Image: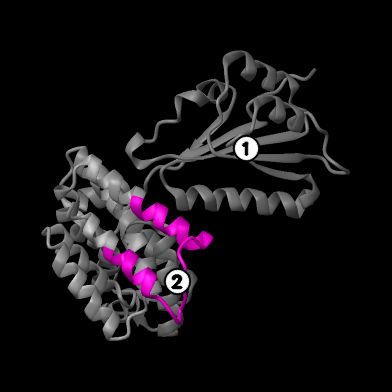
Amino acid sequence: MYTTNMSQIFIFSGPNRFTLYEEKKRWVGNFIQKHGDENLLTVDAKGLTMRDLLDEVSVAPFIASNRLVVVDGPMKCKKEEAQSLSKQIHPQVILLFVVHLDPLRKGKIPAIMKEIEKISDHRQFPKVTRSSLIGWIDEKCKQNSGSIGKDARDLLLEISGEDQGMLSQEIIKLCLYTKGKEITKQHVLDLSITAGESEVWHLMDLLGAGKAEEGIKYVKGLLERGESPYSLWTRLLWVISQLTLVWTAVDSGITHPAAIAKEVGVPPITARSLLPCARRLDKASLTRIVDLIATMDRDLKTGAYRSTAEAPEELSALIDRCILAFRE
C-alpha cells in the first residue's frame, strides 16, 4: 500500500487540441529519452476499468527510476476508486490523463473526473487569444526561417481559422515555398486554399438556398469536366463534419461567422459558407443527413457498394442521394 501525492497524478485538459497534444508529445518524448519506451504505457480511456488502471499503476518500472502511464480521454471514477488510486499507485509511477474538451464545454472537466481531479495536478490548455495567436504565428515563421506580412497573416487566419495545428502546417508549407522571403498575401492565396474547395462551397451555397436539383446538375457538370467522384466524396464528408459544428453553434444562438469560428474552432471562411445551410436545417434533418452519409461511407469502405476508379457510377449515384437528402 502506497500513499501518493499530486506530483504523481496529472490531468492535461482543455479545448486547445494543438497545445494539449504538443505538451503530451513533449512529456512522452522526454520520458522515453530518459527512461526508455519499455516503461511507457498509453491506453484509451474508452473501455478501461478502474481495476485495469489500478493493476497498471501498481507495477514498478523496469530497470529505471520511473514509469509513465498515459490515459487518453476522460475516465469515470467514484470517490472510493480515487482513494484506491491514490493509495495503490506505485511511488515510481507517473499517471497522466489527457482530455481534450469540447469548446462548447467552456473548459470544464467532465463531471465523471471530478474525483480524480481532486488528487491530481490539473494543467489546463485554453483556447489561445487572438493577440497571442498573432505572436505565435510570427514566432512559428521565425522558427522556419521565414517571416509574414500583416495582410498575409490576416488572410491566413481568415482561411485557416485559429486552429494551431492547421496553421502550423500552413506556415511550414509557406516558409518552404518562400525560402526565407517574407510571406505575402499572394503566397497565401496561391498555397493555402486547397484545390477544389471553391467547387464544394458553391455546392453548399446551392444546398443552403434549398436548390438540391441545381446542386445535382452542378455536380454532374463537375464530373463531366473530369472531377473525380472520390475526391468530391472526400471533400463532401469533410464539409458535413464542419456543418455539424456550425449547426451546433447556430442552435446555441451564435449566428455571426467570426463568433461561430471562435466557438467551435472552424475556419471563419467555413463558418460563413455553411451558415445559410445550418440555419435552414432543423435537428431532425441534420441527424438524418449525417446518418445517411455515415452509413454510405461505411458501406463504401466495407464493399457493400461496388464502386471503382474505372466504374464510379455507383459512387456518383450516392453523391446525388446525399444532395437530395438536403431537400427532403
Q: Residue furthest top?
A: 80
Q: In which quarter of the image is residue 92?
A: top right
The residue under label 2 is: 307
Mostly what secondary structure, the magenta segment? helix
Q: How many numbered marks are there? A: 2
Q: Please state if 75 lies on the left or on the right of 194 as rendered.
A: right
Residue at point 23%, 72% (across, down): 151
Q: Can residue 297 be seen in this view?
A: yes
Q: Nearer the viewer, residue 232 or 140?
A: 232
Q: Where, quadrant-wise, is the N terminus in this rendering?
A: top right
- Residue 74 is situated, as x and y percent measured from the top left of the image, at 53, 34
What type is the residue that disc 2 sits on?
Answer: Ser
Residue at point 32%, 68% (across, down): 317
Q: Nearer the viewer, residue 220 or 236?
A: 220
Q: Can residue 141 be seen in this view?
A: no
Would residue 294 be counted in the magenta stretch?
A: yes
Q: Residue furthest right?
A: 63
Q: Residue 26, labelled with which disc? A: none
Residue at point 39%, 35% (across, down): 107
The residue under label 1 is: 96
Report crowding for label 1: few under 14, some 14 to 19, many 20 or more residues within 10 A (C-alpha).
Answer: many
Q: Please state if 213 lies on the left or on the right of 162 as rendered.
A: left
Does the residue at mark 2 contact the one at mark 1 (Cβ under 8 Å)? Answer: no
Report crowding for label 2: few under 14, some 14 to 19, many 20 or more residues within 10 A (C-alpha).
Answer: some
Q: Please state if 220 lies on the left or on the right of 7 as rendered.
A: left
Q: What element carries label 1?
A: strand
- Residue 274 is situated, as x and y percent measured from the top left of the image, at 21, 57
Magenta residues span: 292-320
Q: Is mark 2 on a helix, strand or loop?
A: loop
Please say if 173 is above or below 240.
Answer: below
Of the image marks 2 and 1, the number of the one nearer the N terminus: 1
